[in-house]
């Protein structure tokens, strides 16, 4: 790779792209200062024979200012400290690992800092056997690119190549991936290419890494389509390859691609997907555009991304079950929305949106299967962007919570569990950060209070500690999740969008292949025209068998295997 230090037999080759600078020097602690040579495209390089693994270094600008390497592999002292040369040697034990297909994905989203008391990669490793027993097939790690301080969601990352020092650094992350693969678990890494965090970001001093035309609410956005954008695209695409080749991750989750603006003939998302597919990997995008081009194959003029998060499914289920109608939930709330999302993925596929005050989305082609979409009833955004960080179990009764779980785990889409959800975790998941810049701190505090009503100071240790999982397990809920995942696997409930959805007054019946799922949201009368044998129910009121002409009048759900027809 071009960017970052490269350890060779006769020393270390240092490279940095800095066209704004006429002169650059490399400073290695305890070894000296070295002049760097600039080429016609703005790359500065120097080979230092006496340099090696463990050396800490910075670049010295023309004005004498010292800055870390934007492609640093490790920041042991944080975002303002020295970069460190690290070894890429590791005793991998996953030679026989062949990955997990999209149709077999059951994803479990993890924030490393709050998932376990340790808040480290080693802490996650201790829970891998539990996750394997749960039945998930992949863990999705929220961003680990070096961010300011010791606690953050990860979306304020500054060094795309440097693994967070407080989590265990690059060696710790390799250990986690290695141990996950040994247990048959894939690893998906959440990465952020729509912006770079505000504190510790020195790239704007080096070159046109960032766009002068486009902005995001969170920070500077990469220059993907203007002058010098070839090198910026290379910086990002090498980062994609870096996670796949250096850390053996199986897939990337691309944060908020709707905030990426690229008018190039080849969109950066298409290039990212190409890198992944060349290496036998996959990418999943977060997008609120409801634009099927993101996940459509290139032969249909799409970007070729493998799947995308489906917020419409979450919003439809959440609004209907909780009755909430604030913010974007104003566009949802009827049972018809859930039906439409089951049948057509996007609820808003050209419909007028009250929240956006304009028409939104477009229909997906019939050729796109269910594994193009990831669904959930909770995730870090939908929980953490509430003022009190309340989880769904705090907003609905237990039976309703279990109905929600069955709805999405038995959907034709790829399900994603938010950490703790599977055992009924009741502690909140709040927004927290650890900036040191007073101006940024004021902005974060004011913004979280204004936009989300978060009263607990996001900069406080309290917000972070309250968000750590309690691991107080509700055995009934945990057993339900295990059984639902088992049924999903046994009956191959994945990808096939050919489901028959029948809606009544506060009830749904969903038929697919050999299964019939009955969801009753409040006391209703349902006459069933098909018979089945019960294989899962949330309460004792559903009969062990139903026969044609049977009537149900209770809240709950039942999953039946057809007796005939």
Image (tube, helix red, strand yellow):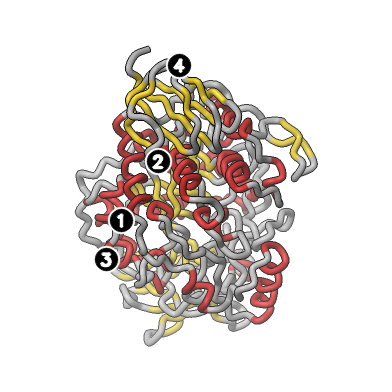
Find disc 3 in the rendering and name its residue.
9
Q: Are marks 2 and 4 in contact (CB under 8 Å)?
A: no
Question: Residue at the location (59% across, 50% down)?
Answer: 256
Q: Which residue is mark 1?
A: 177
Q: CA distance from mark 1 to mark 2?
A: 35 Å
Helix, strand, or loop for circle 1? helix
Crowding at label 1, few (<14), some or many (≥20) Cα neighbours within 10 Å? many
Density class for disc 2 (Cα within 10 Å; few <14, some 14-19, many ≥20) is many
Few, some or many residues within 10 Å of mark 3 (<14, 14–19, 20+): few
- Can residue 557 be seen from the camera position used here? yes
- Asked if the residues shown at circle 4 and circle 1 are in contact, with their CB atoms under 8 angstroms apart, the answer is no
The numbered dot on residue 549 is 4
Q: Is residue 133 left or right of residue 460?
A: left
Rendered view: 392 above or below 445: above
Q: Position of residue 135 (x, y in %)?
A: 30, 45
Q: From this viewpoint, which residue is outermost toward the bottom? A: 30
Quadrant for the C terminus, please: top left
How far apart in space, not on screen, are marks 2 and 4 (Cα)?
22 Å
| SS state under label 2 | loop
> Of discs 3 and 1, which sits in the foreground?
1
How far separated are the C-alphas under marks 4 and 1? 52 Å
Of 14 and 73, the residue lying toward us? 73
- Asked if marks 1 and 2 touch (Cβ < 8 Å), the reply is no
Mark 1 vs 2, N-terminal side: 1
The image shows residue 114 at horizontal and vertical percentages of 43, 67
The mark lying in front, picked from 1 and 2, is: 2
Which residue is most to the right? 357
Residue 483 lies in quadrant:
top left
């Amino acid at each position: 790779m071009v960017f970052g230090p490269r350890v060779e037999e006769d020393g270390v080759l240092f490279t940095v792209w800095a066209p704004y600078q006429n002169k650059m020097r490399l400073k290695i602690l305890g070894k000296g200062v070295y002049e760097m040579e600039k080429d016609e495209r703005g790359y500065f390089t120097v080979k230092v024979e006496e340099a090696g693994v463990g050396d800490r270094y910075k670049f010295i600008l023309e004005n004498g200012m010292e800055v870390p390497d934007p492609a640093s592999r490790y920041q042991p002292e944080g975002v303002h400290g020295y970069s460190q040369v690290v070894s890429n040697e590791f005793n991998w034990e996953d030679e026989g690992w062949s990955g997990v297909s999209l149709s077999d994905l059951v994803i479990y989203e993890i924030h490393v800092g709050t998932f376990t008391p340790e808040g480290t990669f080693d802490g996650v490793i201790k829970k891998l056997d539990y996750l394997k027993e749960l039945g998930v097939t992949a863990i999705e790690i929220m961003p680990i690119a070096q961010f300011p301080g010791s606690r953050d969601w990860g979306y304020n990352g500054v060094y795309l190549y440097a693994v967070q020092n407080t989590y265990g650094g690059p060696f710790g992350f390799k250990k986690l991936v290695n141990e996950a693969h040994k247990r048959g678990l894939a690893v998906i890494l959440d990465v952020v290419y729509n912006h770079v965090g505000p504190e510790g970001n020195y790239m704007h001093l080096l070159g046109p890494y960032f766009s002068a035309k486009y902005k995001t609410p969170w920070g500077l956005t990469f220059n993907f389509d203007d002058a010098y954008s070839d090198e910026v695209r290379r910086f990002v695409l090498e980062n994609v390859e870096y996670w796949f080749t250096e850390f053996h991750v199986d897939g990337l989750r691309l944060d908020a691609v709707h905030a990426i603006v690229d008018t190039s003939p080849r969109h950066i998302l298409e290039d990212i997907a190409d890198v992944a597919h060349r290496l036998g990997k996959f990418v999943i995008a977060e997008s609120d555009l409801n634009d099927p081009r993101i996940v459509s194959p290139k032969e249909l003029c799409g970007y070729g991304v493998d799947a995308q998060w489906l917020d419409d499914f979450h919003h439809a289920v959440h609004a209907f079950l909780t009755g909430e109608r604030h913010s974007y939930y104003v566009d949802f709330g009827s049972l018809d929305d859930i039906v439409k999302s089951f049948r057509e993925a996007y609820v808003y596929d050209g419909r007028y949106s009250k929240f956006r005050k304009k028409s939104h989305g477009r229909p997906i082609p019939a050729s796109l299967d269910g594994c193009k979409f990831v669904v959930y009833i909770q995730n870090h955004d939908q929980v953490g962007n509430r003022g009190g960080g309340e989880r769904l179990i705090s907003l609905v009764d237990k039976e309703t919570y279990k109905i929600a779980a069955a709805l999405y785990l038995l959907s034709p889409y790829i399900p994603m569990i938010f950490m703790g959800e599977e055992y009924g975790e009741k502690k909140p998941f709040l927004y927290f950060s650890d900036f040191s810049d007073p101006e940024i701190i004021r902005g974060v505090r004011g913004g979280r209070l204004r936009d989300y009503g978060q009263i607990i100071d996001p900069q406080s240790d309290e917000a972070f500690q309250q968000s750590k999982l309690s691991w107080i397990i509700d055995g009934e809920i945990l057993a339900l999740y295990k059984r639902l995942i088992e049924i999903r696997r046994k009956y191959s409930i994945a990808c096939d969008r050919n489901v028959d959805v029948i809606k009544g007054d506060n009830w749904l019946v969903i038929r697919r292949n050999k299964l019939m799922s009955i969801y009753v949201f409040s006391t209703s009368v349902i006459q069933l025209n098909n018979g089945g044998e019960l294989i899962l129910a949330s309460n004792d009121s559903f009969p062990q068998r139903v026969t044609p002409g049977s009537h149900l009048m209770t809240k709950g759900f039942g999953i039946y295997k057809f007796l005939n027809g």
